[in-house]
Image (cartoon, rainbow, N blue to C red):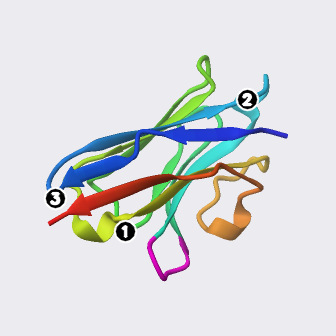
Amino acid sequence: QVQLVESGGGLVQAGGSLRLSCAASGRTFYSYTMGWLRQAPGKGREFVAAIGRSGGTTYYADSGKGRFTISRDNAKNTVYLQMNSLKPEDTADYYCAADDSPYVPSSPGEFDYWGQGTQVTVSP
């Protein structure tokens, strides 16, 4: 089992940037595919991005393509989400998640472990 702790959320103006981090416990971080998901107020949980075990494969939701970049550092047990050109509609709680399948997930239901979330607010 892996435990996940997100950080880096906050308040930013539209057009700004944030980098979210997710620190994972355990010695087998490299064996998990990782992802970021978000949940806006009054909405369901939405897939944002995912990355394969070695970092060589990444998937993005259309909403973040060209603006968001997911990456991981297996030596530091950490996955990141760099978010640029933020929009008010990116406002949400962002969750880090892990999947112990070798396939890179692309929907919230495929992830096995979740962090507690970090809030991102983008003002107009």
| Residue at image mark 1 | 62
Q: Amino acid at mark 2?
A: Ser
Q: Whole-Å distance between the Cαs marked 3 and 2?
A: 33 Å
Q: How far, Cα to Cα, is label 1 from label 2?
A: 30 Å
In this rendering, position of residue 51 left or right of residue 121? right
Secondary structure of residue under mark 2: loop
Q: Nearer the viewer, residue 52 or 24?
A: 24
Q: Nearer the viewer, residue 101 or 21?
A: 21
Residue 15: percent from the left, percent from the top?
A: 14, 54
Instruction: Specify start and end residues of the magenta stretch as a single range.
Output: 40-45
- Seen at 25% across and 60% down, the residue is 122
Question: Which numbered disc, 3 or 1, marks the residue that appears first in the sequence?
Answer: 3
Kindly indicate whether the residue at mark 2 contacts the one at mark 1 (C-beta within 8 angstroms). no
Q: Residue furthest bottom?
A: 42
Nearest to N terminus: mark 1 or mark 2: 2
Badge 2 is on which residue? 25
Circle 3 is placed at which residue position?
A: 14
Front one among 37 and 120: 120
Mark 2: few, some, or many residues within 10 Å (few <14, many ≥20)?
some
Residue 112 screen position, x and y as percent: 77, 56
Which label sits in the foreground, 3 or 1? 3
Location of residue 25 by image quarter: top right
Answer whether labels 3 and 1 touch (C-beta < 8 Å): no
Q: Main secondary structure of the magenta part?
A: loop
| Quadrant of the snapshot with the N terminus | top right
Query: On screen, 96 above or below 89?
Result: above
Q: Quadrant of the C terminus?
A: bottom left
3 or 2: tag closer to the N-terminus: 3
The picture places residue 81, in percent across and down from the top left corner, at 42, 43
Instruction: State the image coordinates of residue 34 (x, y, percent, origin top left).
Output: 62, 45
Question: Mark 3 and mark 1: span between their CA atoms?
Answer: 18 Å
